């Protein structure tokens, strides 16, 4: 890479890092003296900050690397994932956001999802709290490692650094501002990062399109894998109509892609934003801002992959890692200073999600383990300190997992997304809408959902030689079986206690 190119990009990235750390310092001085301030920003986020924070923490490195990479290699047949996610996010704003905002405040001011489950079902033995915290830590560790992998790939491909150094640089900056600024820092940085991501996802495909000499539709309709890959497998050297929405896709494959939308109902790092907005009255504004951002960003990611494929085909310069197409276009098409800004957009996507996940893991370790089992009388200052230590520990373990440089960002995200969607999605929905649901049903739904996903991914079971997860996305059976378990077990066991139904009625009345 030429020296001036490296220098320009380093200047842009350095400015980006300084701004992120500055926001962390600002947040540290604002609201980190107690647990509610550190973990939930004092429930005082504006609709715009809450919306872009939810979007940025949701759309991690997979939006700028994983999804464009899938579009680059398979064309519009992968667009169903984006469609499913947009529909799922819209449903999440309507079905979950207002009720969860009211319910978590009514339910003993719950500040974590496990805390909400325990208070919603009067779980005095903390069984739901502990199991849900374990689910969060297990699946978020996988999820966080996907972001760390994206950071490692970025520094390796763009600056010639070792993959491992990239892991530490990415995680180090995130840990610093999350460690000190807590939820407010995470939310404010997410807002800035969300703006950067949106600009980048609009600029890259538009500029790439203007640089194409041949009609893009014609190029994509006659794409060839052997020109898209440096080392194509024999089975991949063939023509592909990248504009065919149904290319190689069965009905089950399309259902699997659309089913990504079901995952939204159970993502702790997203739905916690609903808990932090100033008032339930702010949620319609939050929804409009959030959905506008997400729709434009998803369209930009899809077009980046498609126009990137056309650019590569036209110039006959295939890339080795399909998930780096955004990086390649940024460096080839733009001035070094602009390229640095665009690379910062990838870091923004990666870091916004990592920080949110670290904070949710930290809150579970602090509130749902340390406070319950180790020191019930811990002071607010002590709990904030434990939360910061937890952030550092989870980050270190995520780096360890990310050392497998062959990990696919999209695969890691899909596994974690399905785990949360199946374990928590039905549980959150039924807990907000079904008065008859009880503790036993909640526990059964969570266990069945999580175990179904793990079995679907890791069990040595095949159908016609194909693994279960390659036949249908694991969130589909997980979500269905979890819902069935909740209904059946709740109906087969005792009705919920009066305190539970009274709380439900109070929430209904306020809504």
Image (cartoon, rainbow, N blue to C red):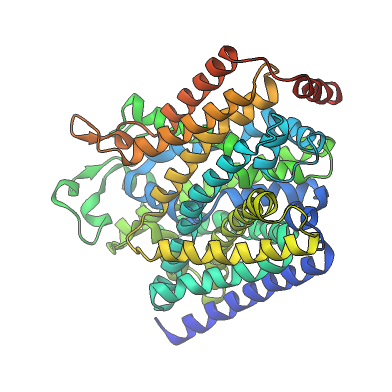
Q: Is residue 322 left or right of residue 108?
A: left
**Which residue is depicted at the point 74% across and 68% down?**
23
Q: Is residue 372 left or right of residue 253?
A: right
x then y, percent, for residue 437: 64, 20
Quarter location, residue 101: top right
Quarter location, residue 494: top right
x then y, percent, for residue 319: 31, 63
Image quarter (top left, top right, bottom left or bottom right) of the C terminus = top right
Looking at the picture, tell me which residue is in the foreground, 441 or 61: 441
Image quarter (top left, top right, bottom left or bottom right) of the N terminus = bottom left
Q: Return the residue found at the far bottom.
A: 3
Q: Is residue 338 visible?
A: no
Question: Quick check: 294 above or below 379?
Answer: above
How many labels were placed on the picture?
0
Question: Quick check: 355 above or below 437?
Answer: below
**Which residue is depicted at the point 53% across and 32% down?**
446
Looking at the picture, tell me which residue is in the foreground, 80 or 307: 80
Q: Is residue 404 left or right of residue 269?
A: left
x then y, percent, for residue 239: 22, 44
Q: Is residue 218 visible?
A: yes
Looking at the picture, tell me which residue is in the foreground, 428 or 263: 428
């Amino acid at each position: 890479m030429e020296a001036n190119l490296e220098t320009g990009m380093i200047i842009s990235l350095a400015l980006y890092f300084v701004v992120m750390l500055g926001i962390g310092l600002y947040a540290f001085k604002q609201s980190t003296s107690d647990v509610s301030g550190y973990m939930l920003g004092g429930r005082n986020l504006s609709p715009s900050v809450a919306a872009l924070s939810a979007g940025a923490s949701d759309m991690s490195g997979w939006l700028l690397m994983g999804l464009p990479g899938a579009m680059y290699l398979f064309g519009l047949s992968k667009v169903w994932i984006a469609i499913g996610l947009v529909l799922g996010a819209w449903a999440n704003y309507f079905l979950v956001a207002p009720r969860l905002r009211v319910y978590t405040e009514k339910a003993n001011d719950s500040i974590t999802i496990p805390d909400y489950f325990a208070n919603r079902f009067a779980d005095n033995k903390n069984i739901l709290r502990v199991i849900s915290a374990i689910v969060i830590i297990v699946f978020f560790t996988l999820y966080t490692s996907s972001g760390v992998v994206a950071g490692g790939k970025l520094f390796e491909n763009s600056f010639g650094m070792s993959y491992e150094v990239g892991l530490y640089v990415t995680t180090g900056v995130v840990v610093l501002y999350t460690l000190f600024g807590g939820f407010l820092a995470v939310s404010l940085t997410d807002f800035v990062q969300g703006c950067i991501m949106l600009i980048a996802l609009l600029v890259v495909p538009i500029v790439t399109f203007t640089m194409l000499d041949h009609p893009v539709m014609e190029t994509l309709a006659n794409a060839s894998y052997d020109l898209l890959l440096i080392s194509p497998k024999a089975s991949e050297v063939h023509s592909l109509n990248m504009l065919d929405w149904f290319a190689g896709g069965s009905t089950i494959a399309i259902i699997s892609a659309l089913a990504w939308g079901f995952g939204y109902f159970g993502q702790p790092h997203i739905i916690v934003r609903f808990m932090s907005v100033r008032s339930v009255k702010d949620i319609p504004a939050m929804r409009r801002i959030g959905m506008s951002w997400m729709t434009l960003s998803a369209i930009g990611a899809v077009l980046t992959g498609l126009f990137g494929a056309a650019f590569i085909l036209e110039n006959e310069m295939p890339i080795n890692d399909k998930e780096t197409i955004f990086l390649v276009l940024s460096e080839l098409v733009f001035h070094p200073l602009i390229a640095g800004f665009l690379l910062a957009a990838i870091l923004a996507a990666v870091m916004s999600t990592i920080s949110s996940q670290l904070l949710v893991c930290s809150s579970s370790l602090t509130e749902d383990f340390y406070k319950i089992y180790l020191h019930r009388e811990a002071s607010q200052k002590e709990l904030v300190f434990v939360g910061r230590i937890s952030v550092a520990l989870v980050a270190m373990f995520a780096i360890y997992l990310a050392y497998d440089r062959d990990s696919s960002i999209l695969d890691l995200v899909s596994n974690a997304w399905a785990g949360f969607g199946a374990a928590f999605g039905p549980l959150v929905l039924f807990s907000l809408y079904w008065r008859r649901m009880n503790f036993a049903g909640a526990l059964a739904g969570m266990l069945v959902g999580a175990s179904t996903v793990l079995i679907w991914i890791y069990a040595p079971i095949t159908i016609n030689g194909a693994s279960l997860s390659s036949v249908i996305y694991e969130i589909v059976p997980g979500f269905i079986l979890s819902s069935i378990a909740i209904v059946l077990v709740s109906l087969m066991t005792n009705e919920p206690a009066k305190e539970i139904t009274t709380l439900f009625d109070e929430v209904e009345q306020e809504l």
